[in-house]
Amino acid sequence: MKETILVEHLEKVFYSQNDMEIIALTDMNLRVPENEFLCILGPSGCGKSTLLRIIAGLEKASSGRVFYNGREHTKPCREIGMVFQSYSLMPWLNVLDNIALGLEFAGVSKPERMAIAREYLDMIGMSNFGKAFPYELSGGMQQRVAIARALANNPDVLLMDEPFGALDAYTRIIMQKELLRIWEQRKKTIIFVTHSVDEAVYLADRIILMSGNPGRIKKEIAITIPRVRERSNPRYGELTSELLALLEGA
Ligand SMILES: Nc1ncnc2c1ncn2[C@@H]1O[C@H](COP(=O)(O)OP(=O)(O)O)[C@@H](O)[C@H]1O
Ligand SMILES: [Mg+2]
């Protein structure tokens, strides 16, 4: 299968205030085939966000390289979209204009971008909030808008950094289902960071488990349970327990 993202010998070192070296990532190697739903699971501080930011081209690697469709990738581009851990909406734009922002940059006409923005507004269950401003919304609603904005751009690769962390349990399950539906329909490659074992087992074709200090890949597990996955499936429970045990030692 064609690989969409390739990460080779990636290393990232930060320097703290007192010049101590923080090795955020060491010798990361990752091959993400086209249309894969990859979940990255790992404890806080193990370098998950740093990895996504480098793949997105938002942060420079200390050494090693990232390739997108066979070409070295170092700068943000439209084909690779990102949903950040904290909702990053433009406070002066209403919800619809926030969702349509990337489309405006891409030169899509106003009627067309508003139609697309409305479609995604409906998808996130916020049809009545198009004219609302970010400050009028709860954290979970703002995050849903941020997700809609990323999806509206229709990127080929979607990098998602704990996107559902701020959602209530019910909305989270709805969004997981919707994301799978979009991924299946639109043939995207998704790299999804989470620290929820349940979420990773529900979503992923493959889970990469990371450990910290220094950040690296600890284990890789393919999830072959057919979708739509039932949490009552015994295999679901076994995988969840196995991963929780691994995470405890990470
Ligand atoms: N800009 C930065 N400057 C210094 N240290 C950083 C910076 N960003 C991340 N780090 C450090 O790198 C490590 C990995 O961080 P991060 O990628 O945010 O982890 P995660 O997303 O898995 O919680 C942590 O030790 C963190 O403190
Ligand atoms: Mg993080």
Image: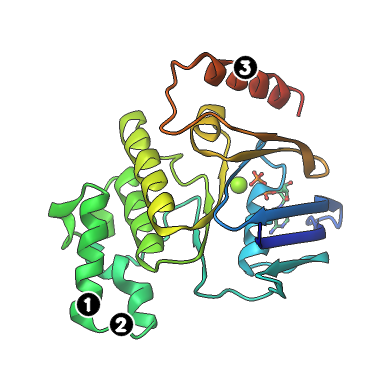
Residue found at x 32% / y 56%: 145
Please count the marks in the image: 3
Q: Give residue 108's mark.
A: 2
Q: Position of residue 134 (x, y in %)?
A: 28, 58
Amino acid type indicated by mark 3: Ser
Please, what secondary structure does the residue beneath circle 1 have? helix
Amino acid type indicated by mark 2: Val
Q: Give residue 241's mark.
A: 3
Which quarter of the figure is the N terminus placed in?
A: bottom right
Q: Does 168 appear above or below 154? A: above
Residue found at x 26% / y 70%: 97
Q: Establish whether ligand 2 lies closer than 8 Å to the Cβ of label 2.
A: no
Q: Is residue 94 visible?
A: no
Whether pointer 3 and pointer 1 mark residues with C-beta atoms closer than 8 Å, the reply is no
Q: Give residue 112's mark.
A: 1
Residue found at x 34% / y 43%: 140
Q: Does 7 appear above or below 161? A: below
